[in-house]
Image (cartoon, coloured by chain):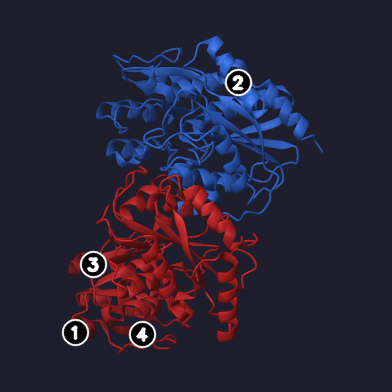
Chain colours: A red, B blue
Amino acid sequence: MEIAHPYLLFLGDVPDALAAKTGLGIVDWRREWCLGQYRLDGCKADAGLPDMAPKQAAEAGAKTMIIGAVNAGGVLPEHWVDSIVAALEAGLDVASGLHMRLADVPEIRDAAARTGRHLRDVRHSEIAFATGKGTRRTGRRLLAMGTDCSVGKKYTALALEKGMRDAGFDADFRATGQTGIFISGRGVSLDAVVADFISGAAEWISPAAEPDHWDVIEGQGSLFHPSFAGVTLGLLHGSQPDAFVVCHEPTRTTMRGVDTPLPTIQQVIDMTIALGRLTNPEIRCVGICVNTAALSEPDARRELTEIERAYELPTTDPVRFGCASIVQRIAREFPSA
Amino acid sequence: MEIAHPYLLFLGDVPDALAAKTGLGIVDWRREWCLGQYRLDGCKADAGLPDMAPKQAAEAGAKTMIIGAVNAGGVLPEHWVDSIVAALEAGLDVASGLHMRLADVPEIRDAAARTGRHLRDVRHSEIAFATGKGTRRTGRRLLAMGTDCSVGKKYTALALEKGMRDAGFDADFRATGQTGIFISGRGVSLDAVVADFISGAAEWISPAAEPDHWDVIEGQGSLFHPSFAGVTLGLLHGSQPDAFVVCHEPTRTTMRGVDTPLPTIQQVIDMTIALGRLTNPEIRCVGICVNTAALSEPDARRELTEIERAYELPTTDPVRFGCASIVQRIAREFPSA
């Protein structure tokens, strides 16, 4: 699944920034791919991009309009269909991370056929994956694990990609979810893969590479989440990471969406190693990434210091305070060949 | 997915019994549901049932023709299509465990529409599963775990269902794979569920029940198999078993289809408890089931004795020697309320 950029971000008429977090996430990490935003009357989200209609965006060189917002329920509102048809008519491809397929809407399907433009449903891969093999591949891999879902694994992986590149590493972010796919222009939405092929899809996402190349792989779910642990384990086995970080949100009390209590960071480290060594006996933890967005800066720094002392591992909020300590740890533990 | 019986078993013209193992498995466990077999010229498999054509079978009361054989590659041979159309014309539903859908063949789709009969593709569930919740349900559950794929987990669960019923338990086999679905008439082929819904589908398969009711759940894969461990973990979390058995094939040296070495029985016990207690803190191992088909009877008995001594758990080949010791253990560990 390759998504052509530059992008026009469609934000619809959503009532707040949260509903546009896909679009805002793309701007956070790939501002240079984003030509403009397309908003309907009443839109309360703002990605800070020039407002433009599809025709203007196409004339300015845009290749794809990304549906960067969701309405309640995750379905496509009927009054967004005209905007999507207009984008196709203007010569743009249209990409969506919704569960439904764009082509399931007859007007959109017909417009795509008429204009010859592509509809990119990133939750639906057309690739026929093989089952996972567990065979060691060349190249280095880092995977973001978590004490829970939605604790910042994607942002952590993106911050590590940037930090490693800045430090001279040859590193690529590898997307395993829809927003990550828009940010990197490729990848597989793992949660939508058929169960038998989870680890096979993870192997596909992160293929054999040069010995010093690092794939920094977006994590999914948690080994301790009763809804999604199977996806997490298949991703761990298929990624065969040399290194992992544990992502944590310190104000949670139960796992997202369920009544299950949160595991400790130590439980996540131990279980990741116990399970991950099946496909990489050398797997090790290189740091802890804490999402401190809910804490004041002094509280955040205190929390990080406490966790760092308790675990004796580099600990940071990679978005707020950078990830130099973890990158240094990686450089020390994995000297280039 | 409910499959109406009695069945007519279609064995095609397969070259050996292995290719008809789905059909033969149904006869092993549900002889009373099987009216006859339908074989084409040259068929080398024999389920020991009266040979009959679809018309005869329908007249004798059959409701469904099961595709009980596969040819190399797992696709539907063109020369089987006429037989399937004939079954629909005779008034039978047709059920298949192939990866492809029966309705993808235009002649079959048209015949089903014309006759109003159902096509049952047991690998493709039409149910919209919820994500798993991890909430405790009433009723008891036993899950068959394994050191590998294809070590006898389905036969073990079926033998335990029978043994428990014979001992007065209220017990039901719960199918998680295609042959199991034909044997029980219902279930979900877990390997074909979308990854996000594995544990949710497992929760659906084994719903809340009377406090003394036992679901005996067919296992899938292995926590130590690099291709399928994600499915196994989702099934474990969704099943929230009170009890599990470990199934083992003593002559294997590597996991099926990959180069990964086999785990020990102890590793499977420990990892099943470590992961399974997320959704059932009381989970415990109640026995070891060894598939001794490759061993002489003296060797088989010696192997069972050795394992039983090493692990201090009831150990048997449930198909060859019955499972009374495990059923007694369950009765002792889980006295009825």
Residue under pointer 2: B306
The x and y percentages for residue B315 are: 63, 24
The x and y percentages for residue A265 are: 57, 62
Residue under pointer 3: A112
Residue at 67% x, 48% y is: B280
Residue under pointer 1: A60
Residue at 41% x, 62% y is: A99
Q: CA distance from mark 3 to mark 2?
A: 67 Å
Q: Chain of mark 3?
A: A
The secondary structure type at the circle numbered 3 is helix
Q: CA distance from mark 1 to mark 2?
A: 75 Å
Q: Chain of mark 1?
A: A
Residue type, numbered disc 2: Glu
Question: Mark 3 vs mark 2: same chain?
Answer: no
Residue type, numbered disc 1: Ala
Mark 3 touches mark 4? (CB < 8 Å)? no
Q: Which labelled disc corresponds to residue A39?
A: 4
